[in-house]
Image: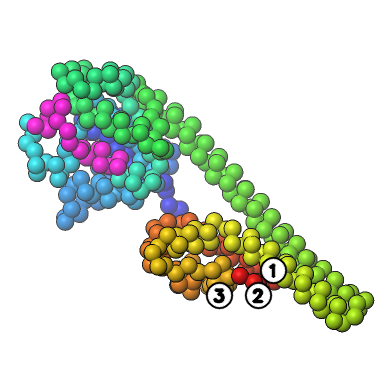
Amino acid sequence: MARLRIFVSSTYYDLRHIRSSMESFLEGMGYEAVLFESGGIAFHHDMTLADACYAEVQTCHMLVLVIGGRYGSADEKRKEQASEEVIEKMYSAYNSVTKREYETARDKNIPIFIFVDKNVRSEYETFKSNRENKTVRYAHVDSVNIFLLLDDIINQSYNNFVKEFEKFEDISSWLKEQWAGIYSDLLMSRRDHAAIKSMADRLAELSELTNSMKSYTETIMKKVLPPESASAAIDIESKRDLNRKMLRFMKEPMITYIQNSCRVMEGGFVPTALDLYHALDASDSASEFMTRANVPTPVLTSLLSRSNDLHSGFNSLKESYCNPYLEPLKGVAE
């Protein structure tokens, strides 16, 4: 069974005791702690050490970011452009390796757990009131880039909760609580998924029953009404039923998005709802659906950039409108 891989990101020398405790804590939890000093990172001959770290972040399930008083060494690309004397200055702006590790995890939407030394967090409040004053010398940080990193983190819309710490136990106890909550949510989600699947099965049974009742009603009508009247009544009701389904189909978010996106394109082709339905009915995948519907390339590119939404939307439509228990939408007026 694969273990949960957790990347530990921080400066080394000032936080090496925290990193050591973190490694023991994670291994004790049964997880794989990924730290460069413990050989958890594969250093390739054709990559810089920093780039190897960034690549390793992308293979992990979570990242724990610990921010202390040191900003850390500059990213390799920045080192080529600046001397060590410039980098060490309090107000010199540059990207550190630790910051790049954080950005890599953030850009890949990897869950991040962020801890900031209590003194640093307190001094951050002083910095916010003195942003333009470069004569201030801060006691607990070696670079204002630490505060700028906190700015960046706090300004994110999610995945950005910051927890203060004084000792390692503050970190470990909070992580235990958070991970227990995540595990609880996962179990609840699996239970809800099972309930939804059960509901879907019942809806399929209900659809089958509805179709059976419709057939039974049509049979009765044919027996009690004159042939021409029975056929006319059945045709009228069938068209009403199919048109109701088509009206619902036209209002589906994915369908309206495709049509509206096509409309704003100059001279663009706008597939009708009926065209889209027939393409959906004949397709086994989202990409095949887009091809059959002749969706313009710019719209297709936009949809493919959100592949999760595209595939979930396709599957939802397929389940709702191409269910084998449902009568196909044929002969519907556009």
* Residue bearing the label numbered 1: 242
Q: Tell me where residue 117 appears, x and y as whole percent.
A: 31, 24
- Is the residue 47 above or below the residue 132 in the image? below
The disc at residue 221 is none
Q: Which residue lies furthest to the bottom in this view?
A: 227
Instruction: Check if mark 2's residue and mark 1's residue have beta carbons within 8 Å.
Output: yes
The disc at residue 282 is 3
Residue 129 versus residue 100: which sits nearer the camera? 129
| Left or right placement of residue 119 versus residue 133 in this view | right
| Left or right placement of residue 149 versus residue 60 in this view | left
Look at the image and give the residue range highlighted in magenta. 86-103
Mark 2 Cα-neighbour bin, 10 Å: few <14, some 14–19, many ≥20: few
* Secondary structure found at label 2: loop
- Upstream in the sequence, badge 3 or badge 1? 1
Q: Tell me where residue 203 appears, x and y as whole percent.
A: 71, 59
Task: Inspect the magenta stretch and tell me whether residue 329 lies in it.
Answer: no
Q: How far apart are marks 2 and 1 (CA)?
A: 8 Å
- What residue is drawn where x is 20% and y is 38%? 95
* Secondary structure found at label 3: loop
Q: Which residue lies furthest to the right in this view?
A: 224
Which marked residue is nearer to the observer: mark 3 or mark 1? 1
Q: What residue type is labelled 1?
A: Leu
- What residue is drawn where x is 69% and y is 55%? 199
Q: Tell me where residue 118 appears, x and y as whole percent.
A: 33, 21
Mark 1 Cα-neighbour bin, 10 Å: few <14, some 14–19, many ≥20: some
| Left or right placement of residue 296 versus residue 282 in this view | left
**Residue 132 seen by the camera:** yes
Q: Which amino acid does label 3 sit on?
A: Ala
